[in-house]
Amino acid sequence: MDRDTFAYSTKFFRDYSGPTRGASCQSHEHVDYIEKPEVFTYADFFKDYLIPNDPCVFSAKFTEGWGSRRKWVTPDGKPNFEYLLRTFGEAVVPVANCDVKEYNSNPKEHLKLKEYINYWKEHIKKGYRSPRGCLYLKDWHLHRAFPEQDVYTIPVYFSSDWLNEYWDAIAVDDYRFVYMGPKGSWTPFHADVFRSYSWSANICGKKKWLIFPPGQEEFLRDRHGHLPFDITSPELKKGSLYPRYAQSSPPVEIIQEAGEIIFIPSGWHHQVYNLEDTISINHNWVNGCNVAIMWSFLQDELAAVQREIREWKDSMEDWHLQCQVLMKSYTGIDYKEFYNFLKIIAENRIFVLENHHSEEDASKHSYRAAISGLGMLHAVFDLKRTAKVLTSLNANEEFKKLNPETLSPPPSALLHRLKAAIDTALL
């Protein structure tokens, strides 16, 4: 991060008053197309898309060196089933049935990849029809299962990735996925986990995205407050069922070609279709630009849980703790883990600032190398954003009920250390 970008981001977040952004996209009628890697810098992406929370599409030139684009695709642009079978055939993968709705999502089963590819080949032969329905391989943690494979290189624009930095540190999970599906497979209407950013690269095939800027989803709720499963359903036009639908704006439609990467900002709800046999790679990620949006989302999630079980508030022992347990089961994180998330992000950056990042440390800690590679001012920016959200968390009444001073280190001590590191770095 250069000094101009640091100054710009500091001013933006000093003046910025709320968690939800996305109002600056060009009339929400078209999305910028980034053609040339050699003239598009990290600072360009940071200032023009991350901070304003606007989508964009990167051309296939940004992925042309990836191993998956060379090896996973046949010369005519189709999935290279034989290579995938040889390399990953015994892997167990999650597969969703696009033809079945279950609790506002698609039910999943687990198959070996070779079974899924056999299904896919048969599905193509039968004109994209199958008694088993339209099956879609989704959310496969291939990077975690096959870290040694030459699949892709994360573009620098997406390298400040706090989610995967944290989950790699605790060795529990990650938010890096592979999707594979036939023409006609699709993903229902949703916003991404924790209201994170996502980037999605088509290795082969073509997708259609229908995306809505933050706030538009409120017009798409039914009379009970629920979001639709399919935003193309004619049911939405029934005013008795969806009373505010007439106030909604049409979605932004994007056709994503092979090799292209789409950036979906925080809180942009979307629905996605595979127009051809398609393979894609997706990351969810959070950084200093949207961590406040994540924190706002977690507060909303806890409030929703509390509303659901409020009738037991007086009779249930440790009701507030039970709310945290339920929130974690629904959302994947609770307030204490969110604190731990902020702590690890902060400690990695404090270490880099205090130790100026040696080559020996780089070989042992890839995320510290990435932090250092983005520059010391980026580490300071990250610490300032972490301190802002941590201050809000520490003042939160629900967090106070969890005895935060028993955490290691206590939030007050971590905040003191954060502010000292920022002050020292800016001397």
Image: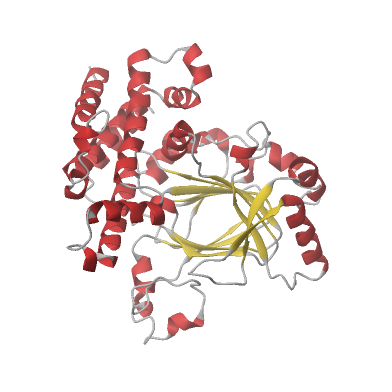
Residue 169 position by quadrant? top left
The answer to whether residue 266 is seen in the rendering is no
Asked which colour scheme the image uses, the reply is: secondary structure
Where is residue 135 drawn, in percent x and y?
A: 67, 64
Report the front residue among 422 and 401. Answer: 401
Report the front residue among 299 and 75. Answer: 299
Where is residue 316 drawn, in percent x and y?
A: 23, 60
Residue under the image location 50 percent in, 82 percent down: 234
Residue under the image location 22 percent in, 31 percent down: 410
Instruction: Point out the image quarter for the C terminus.
Output: top left
Report the front residue among 154 and 333. Answer: 333
Instruction: Say if 292 sits above or below 366 in the image.
Output: below
User: Does residue 77 appear to the left or right of 339 in the view shown?
Assistant: right
User: Does residue 12 appear to the left or right of 206 in the view shown?
Assistant: left
User: Does residue 106 appear to the left or right of 323 in the view shown?
Assistant: right
Residue under the image location 50 percent in, 44 percent down: 175
Where is residue 91 drawn, in percent x and y?
A: 70, 45
The answer to whether residue 301 is seen in the rendering is yes
Instruction: Say if 169 sits above or below 115 in the image.
Output: above
Instruction: Say if 292 sits above or below 316 in the image.
Output: above
